[in-house]
Amino acid sequence: MSPRLEILHTDERIVVVAKPVGSVVVPGRGPDPEEPLSHALGRELGSQVWVVHRLDREASGVVLFARDAEAHRSLSLQFERRETSKSYLVLVQGAVAAPGEVDRPLREFGSGRVAVDPRGKPALTRWRVLRRFPGATLLEVEPVTGRRHQIRVHLYSIGHPVMGDTRYGEPRPVGGAPRLMLHAHTLAFVHPDGAPTTVRSEPGPDFEAVLRLLPGSARE
């Protein structure tokens, strides 16, 4: 397995990894030299793994896989029923004054972009402020629903695009950040064997390096 792939938890039923920036969870539609995590992980474990959920290529953090079909059904139902809990660390452009939420439907378009649209699917994102910097704010974000690009589009829609985003916000990458500043920090779910389980992935050096370059900060 590639040395950049960190296993956070593994047992007979599940495996959780810390996805690095630039990697994909499943194979893309076109030719792509990047081996997806699902393939790399299955090859290393010597058995098939089932994809439970995904992260954008540009994001990093916790990704959960099942190691048998029954575990996959159990975990997938939890995601479908919104019985899991996810939190992300997200650095956004501008000053966010207080905790809040965006409750706006999202619609996917053929170009691959997603936008707020009344014809879209319901989507709800909540956040609280962790740290403030001149011109930027570090948030802890909870996507209550799990739409494609949900966090990125919802925050962009209220004037706070994610730093480093090359798709939503101007100029690109937003704020000149060298990576998308969106990291899947924690994932809480019920293990297929019945135990409440929480897995955490701390942001890597590339995420922390961007924060260190920001002038002055004030903790909440």
Image (spheres, rainbow, N blue to C red):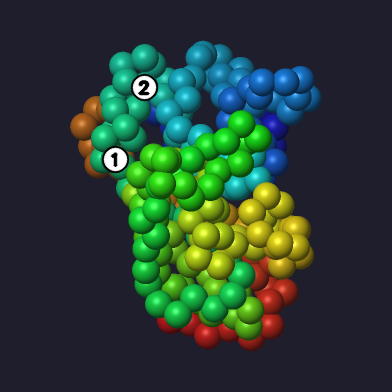
* Residue displayed at 76% across by 20% down: 31
Q: Quadrant of residue 98?
A: bottom left
* Residue displayed at 56% across by 67% down: 160
Quadrant containing the N terminus in the rendered view? top right
Q: Is residue 88 visible?
A: yes
> Label 2 is placed on what type of residue?
His
Which marked residue is nearer to the observer: mark 1 or mark 2? 1
Which percent across, then down, holds residue 134? 63, 83
Instruction: Check disc 2 and report its element: helix, strand or loop.
Output: helix
Which percent across, then down, holds residue 89? 50, 60
Q: 46 or 159: nearer the eye? A: 159
- The residue positioned farthest toward the left in the image shown: 194
For marks 1 and 2, the one nearer the N-term is 2
Inter-mark Cα distance, 1 to 2: 15 Å
The correct choice, above or below, for 175 with respect to 194 in the image is: below
Q: 37 or 1: nearer the eye? A: 37
* Residue displayed at 39% across by 53% down: 104
Quadrant containing the C terminus in the rendered view? bottom left
Q: Which residue is mark 2?
A: 72
Q: In the rendered view, does 187 fall on the left or right side of 78?
A: right
Which percent across, then down, holds residue 149? 53, 45
* Residue displayed at 55% across by 53% down: 152
Q: Which residue is mark 1?
A: 82
- The residue positioned farthest toward the front in the image shown: 119
